[in-house]
């Protein structure tokens, strides 16, 4: 709350107090008053019956003690005004009882209004229970100051020598007066708790910081100034401001000398200890020799700080000694002013930063060359008070961003903005330059809506924000998902420099702190499941909580050097090196099919009985022809690698899926059809399409029978094994008795599927046997078509879903009642080909979202959309209903730009997405930040149901897979630093990599444990050039290899797998019908 705001509202809304008279009240809630200016009564009536009477104020002059008290108060207020600010005219202060009567009447009416109107329309920012919480237990203020007290008992240990002679202070709210109309923790006056260390002993002291507000309210013996968070909401807040303005006009209080508190931050700068809150200028306080504290006064840098406020978190560069700081103007553009102050206290000129609207910028960061400021989702909209709301609002549609300005800039011209969803933090730890990037560290608040009044539900997880000054792109990387964490502490000698260790508090739950944790920022960069980012923690016993910690170095010797980091860059969709990578080593295709080969050597172990009679298949690209114009991994024709188990033995074979494209190109002996990812970009891509069209026109090829591949997904449905890619309809393949494979043909559900394509990831509900699927039209709205197919293969009517534009929807999810599909950031824009680009692009400005539609819906009318930044996944593991929520599991792509061409730099971290059908809100919760992970597999008996265990591959780096991990989704919900979400892990030796795993339950008995079963995966030793099929025990913490089958042929890296059981094979139909 700035003075500017107070005066503005005072100017425009003063009359609202005057209108707060009897006639404006609802007759059923009338207020009556006997205002002879000697005795005022206010009561509440309902239906003309007095239900409550309040005798609030008496100015009966016959009470001499009261008269004397009033006179004293008046004298003291006058004296105080003379001390802290410009004197008002005598006449304005005079007015005595009349003024007081008017003010107190207004106040009384306000109190009454609140009393009668509490349950009506006002929706305060702070929910009432939260306000209560902040006034009880150890949140309650202490009711008196404490001079230095030597009775500090050293229970254990000794005071470290680096603390000797020093003082530890902590600021806090501690309101001096009982809140009048509403209270929030942030509104308290500010009290410092001070421990001074000397010669192995300690003294304790606590003192209020004597702000202008504190002094005037202390004299008045009651609150006079409006409290931003607890009081200023709705019309009551407006009335409160008006009352404040009236008091200011009448000279009863002086707002010019400051209206805020000093309860939040602390800094030692230019020989001054500053206590600060962002609603006022700093206050200088002085620590005396005996460990006491005295307020010196409001500090405006010798008159140079014109704004009435300053951040509570200025930054001091330890190298130059300069202070960097800012002020926010809540009512007037440009809203933000940055400035710096030289080491000797000279404030430099402001640099105005234009924001679209005022927002809460509680903290920021500096590097050695730049200032980094957030433009947050916590916005100030004064007009919301007229809607009975708080002016402090959460705008969850706004994409938060970081502004980066050189420290030496004199205007905002050189600022660079970086949009970065899900990056609003209360505090930022530190920032530094690293290659082309600025790295900022902070704890994001999630969901942002809970920041003020439901902190116990808040998830705050330490993250790094990477802002690339060269490319203009930004991404976020979470540090640890098993710690609900806040705080901003680190070794301040590393301010502006790369920092490795961060200290802070663990949620107890918030706003209480149940422990202290230490993070290693480098651990999370390694994506090592064996390495926790939480490298130190201390959890306190039940009912014991702490404050934010502060790190003190043992000495000021700067010998603790840190490593240099890496840097990243962004390239076009198809990176020239990527096609090469996908055609060499074990990505290279095998050049011939292989008929059933019994030379599979069981290296060790035995084949588990649940596999007997079944077949394990894995799909993959394996292009039949050398690429013509360009190649991407996704463009290959599709080859199945099959192991059939029978009577303790196994046979292996591999077969192309004979798609329409494959058959025609095979005949022609060369590629004829355009390849979406590798070829169709820019003008060459257009030429390629034109050539294709010409060939089709001339009848050299037939596109009508399908132009795509079948290289990605596999499903067994209605007695048919389907091989699928999203650029064509499914193909039915038949597994023969001897374990060979024969392509039956393109499957359009007996002519019912009119679209030319279908997802490669349809979902089958194990309970109903229905298949849920969809097609995407890349050119024409509504773009997405959902449909289901009954267990006997009858396709039901399409449900068209209107999207703003075509996008890549590679996968989706179903629950027992809903279909959940993503509207992703990977968009298809054919027009981009004219800009020499690929039509497949990443739109990092688009907020991805989930659509949720009942499974039985026949139109899109009942769809619910949930915006959720940073939620674009290629694959979704599963989804289920949980209370009012739909929970979806997946691994979002980060940074999204790297999806196609720099997958080695991709960070994929398993997360749960929570979509609340009742409130319409959504949030994301990361499962484990120490594992770069994809390919979420699970026990398919749990499809549509709550799933606890997820299996997948670890980055080797991507697109290679260096190991297999098993996640416990319940672990991450506990936010327990001692509990890893990775409950099973098998990392392969150097140069050994695997394919996506597939989970096979030990039996179909529904009573067996969810994770009782085996994980199957193809494995390749690049050094020995040997491929194997591994069977791992899913319940073992090391995912122990129980069976290893050495294969007679090389199995290239590929896509998705499937186990077809003996029972399914016996029901197989060798036809399209
Ligand atoms: Fe703070
Ligand atoms: Fe896939």
Image (tube, grey):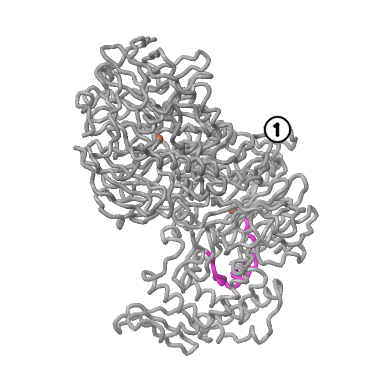
Q: What residue is rendered at 48% in x and 46% in y? A: 870
| Vertical order, 112 against 740 (above or below) | below
Residue ranking furthest to the front: 698
Q: Position of residue 20 (x, y in %)?
A: 46, 82
| x and y percentages locating residue 627 in the rendered image | 50, 30
- Which residue does the numbered mark 1 point to in the structure image? 560
**Residue 598 appears anywhere in the view:** yes
Along the line of sight, which residue is nearer the eye, 731 or 373? 731
Residue 215 lies in the magenta stretch: yes
Decide if residue 284 is in sight here: no
Quadrant position of the N terminus in the picture: bottom right
Residue at x-position 47% and y-position 47%: 827
Q: Is residue 733 above or below residue 1023?
A: below
The verdict on label 1 being within 8 Å of ligand 1 is no
Camera-side residue of 104 and 592: 592
Mark 1 residue element: loop
Q: Quadrant of residue 984?
A: top left
Residue at position x 40%, y 78% in the image = 54
Dividing the image into 4 quarters, which one contains the C terminus? top left
Over which residues does the magenta segment extend?
205-228
In the image, residue 33 lies at what x, y percent?
A: 42, 85
Total marks placed: 1
Residue 348 is left or right of residue 275, and the answer is right
Q: Is residue 425 left or right of residue 491?
A: left
Which image quadrant is residue 943 in? top left
Going by the image, does 749 lie left or right of 300? Answer: left
Residue 744 colored magenta?
A: no
Vertical order, 1065 against 300 (above or below): above
């Amino acid at each position: 709350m700035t003075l500017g705001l107070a005066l503005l509202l005072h100017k425009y809304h003063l009359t609202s107090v005057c209108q707060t008279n009897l006639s404006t009240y609802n007759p059923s809630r009338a207020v009556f008053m006997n205002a002879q200016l000697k005795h005022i009564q206010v009561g509440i009536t309902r239906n003309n019956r007095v239900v409550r009477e309040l005798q609030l104020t008496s100015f009966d002059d016959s009470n001499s003690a009261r008269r004397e008290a009033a006179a004293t108060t008046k004298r003291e207020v006058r004296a105080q005004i003379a001390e802290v600010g410009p004197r008002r005219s005598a006449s304005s202060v005079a007015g005595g009882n009349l003024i007081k009567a008017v003010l107190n009447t207004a106040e009384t009416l306000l109190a009454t209004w609140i009393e009668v109107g509490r349950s009506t329309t006002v929706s305060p920012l702070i929910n009432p229970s939260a306000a209560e919480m902040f006034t009880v237990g150890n949140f309650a203020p202490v009711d008196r100051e404490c001079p230095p007290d030597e009775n500090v008992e050293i229970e254990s240990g000794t005071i470290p020598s680096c603390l000797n002679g020093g003082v530890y202070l902590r600021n806090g709210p501690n309101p001096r007066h009982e809140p009048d109309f509403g209270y929030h923790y942030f509104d308290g006056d500010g009290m410092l708790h001070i421990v001074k260390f000397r010669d192995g002993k300690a003294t304790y002291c606590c003192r209020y910081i004597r702000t202008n507000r504190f002094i005037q309210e202390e004299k008045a013996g009651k609150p006079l100034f409006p409290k931003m968070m607890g009081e200023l909401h709705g019309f009551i807040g407006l009335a409160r401001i008006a009352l404040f303005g009236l008091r200011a006009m009448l000279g009863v209080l002086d707002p010019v000398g400051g209206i805020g508190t000093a309860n939040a931050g602390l800094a030692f700068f230019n020989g001054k200890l500053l206590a600060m809150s962002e609603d006022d200028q700093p206050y200088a306080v002085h620590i005396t020799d005996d460990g006491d504290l005295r307020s010196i006064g409001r500090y405006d840098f010798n008159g140079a700080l014109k704004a009435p406020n300053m951040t509570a978190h200025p930054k001091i560069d330890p190298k130059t000694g300069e202070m960097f700081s800012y002020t926010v103007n809540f009512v007037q553009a440009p809203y933000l002013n940055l400035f710096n102050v030289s080491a000797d206290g000279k404030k430099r000129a402001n640099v105005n930063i234009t924001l679209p609207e005022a927002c809460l910028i509680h903290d920021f960061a500096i590097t050695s060359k730049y200032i980094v400021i957030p433009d947050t989702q916590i916005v100030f909209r004064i007009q919301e008070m007229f809607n009975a709301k708080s002016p402090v609002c959460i705008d969850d549609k706004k994409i938060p961003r970081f502004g980066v300005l050189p420290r030496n800039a004199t205007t905002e011209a050189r600022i660079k903005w970086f949009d970065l969803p899900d990056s609003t933090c209360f505090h930022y730890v530190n920032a530094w330059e690293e290659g082309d990037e600025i790295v900022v560290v902070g704890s994001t608040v999630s969901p942002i809506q809970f920041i003020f009044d439901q902190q116990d539900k808040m998830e705050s997880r330490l993250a790094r924000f990477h802002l690339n000054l060269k490319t203009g792109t930004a991404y976020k990387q979470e540090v640890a998902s098993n710690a609900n964490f806040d705080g901003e502490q680190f070794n301040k000698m590393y301010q502006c420099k790369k920092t490795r260790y961060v200290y802070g508090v663990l949620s107890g739950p918030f706003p209480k702190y149940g422990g202290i944790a230490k993070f290693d920022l480098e651990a999370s960069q390694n994506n090592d499941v064996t390495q926790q980012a939480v490298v130190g923690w201390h959890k306190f016993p039940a009912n014991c909580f702490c404050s934010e910690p502060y790190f003190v170095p043992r000495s000021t010797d700067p010998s603790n050097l840190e490593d240099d980091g890496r840097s990243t860059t962004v390239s076009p969709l198809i990176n020239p090196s990527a096609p090469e990578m996908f055609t060499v080593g074990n990505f290279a295709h095998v050049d011939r099919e292989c008929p059933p080969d019994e030379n599979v050597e069981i290296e060790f172990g035995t084949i588990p009985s649940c596999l007997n009679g079944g077949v394990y298949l894995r799909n993959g690209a394996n292009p039949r022809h050398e690429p013509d114009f360009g190649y991407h991994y996704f463009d290959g024709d599709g080859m199945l690698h099959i192991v059939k188990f029978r009577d303790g033995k196994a046979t292996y074979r591999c077969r192309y899926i004979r798609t329409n494209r494959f058959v025609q190109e095979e005949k022609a002996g060369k590629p004829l059809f355009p390849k979406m990812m590798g070829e169709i970009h820019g003008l060459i891509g257009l030429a390629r399409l034109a050539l294709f069209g010409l060939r089709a026109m001339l009848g050299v090829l037939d596109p009508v029978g399908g132009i795509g591949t079948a290289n990605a997904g596999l499903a067994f449905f209605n007695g048919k094994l389907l091989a699928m890619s999203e650029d064509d309809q499914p193909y039915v393949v038949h597994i023969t008795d001897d374990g060979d494979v024969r392509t039956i043909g393109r499957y359009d559900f007996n002519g019912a599927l009119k679209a030319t394509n279908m997802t490669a990831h349809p979902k089958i509900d194990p309970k109903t046997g229905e298949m849920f699927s969809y097609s995407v039209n890349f050119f024409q709205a509504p773009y997405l078509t959902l449909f289901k197919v009954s267990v006997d293969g009858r396709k039901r009517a399409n449900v068209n879903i209107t999207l703003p534009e075509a996008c890549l929807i590679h996968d989706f999810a179903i629950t027992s009642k809903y279909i959940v599909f993503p509207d992703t950031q990977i968009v298809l824009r054919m027009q981009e080909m004219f800009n020499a680009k690929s039509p497949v692009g990443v739109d990092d400005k688009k907020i991805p979202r989930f659509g949720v539609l009942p499974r039985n819906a026949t139109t899109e009318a009942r769809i619910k959309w949930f915006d959720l930044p940073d939620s674009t996944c290629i694959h979704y593991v599963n989804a289920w209903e949980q209370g009012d929520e739909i929970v979806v599991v997946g691994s979002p792509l980060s940074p999204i730009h790297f999806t196609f061409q720099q997958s080695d730099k991709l960070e994929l971290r398993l997360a749960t997405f929570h979509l609340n059908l009742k409130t319409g809100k959504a949030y994301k919760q990361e499962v484990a930040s120490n594992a770069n992970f994809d390919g979420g597999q699970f026990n398919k008996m749990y499809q549509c149901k709550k799933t606890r265990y997820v299996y997948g591959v670890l980055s080797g780096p991507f697109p290679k897979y260096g190991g297999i991990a098993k996640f416990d989704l319940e672990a991450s919900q506990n936010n327990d630093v001692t509990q890893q979400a990775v409950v099973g892990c098998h990392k392969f030796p150097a140069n050994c990599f695997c394919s996506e795993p597939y989970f096979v339950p030990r039996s179909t008995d529904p009573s067996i444990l969810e994770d009782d079963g085996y994980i199957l995966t193809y494995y390749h030793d690049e050094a020995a050039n040997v491929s194997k099929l591994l069977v791992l025990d899913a319940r073992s913490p090391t995912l122990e290899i129980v069976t290893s089958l050495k294969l007679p042929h090389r199995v290239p890296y590929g896509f998705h797998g499937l186990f077809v059981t003996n029972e399914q094979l016996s029901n197989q139909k060798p036809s399209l019908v």
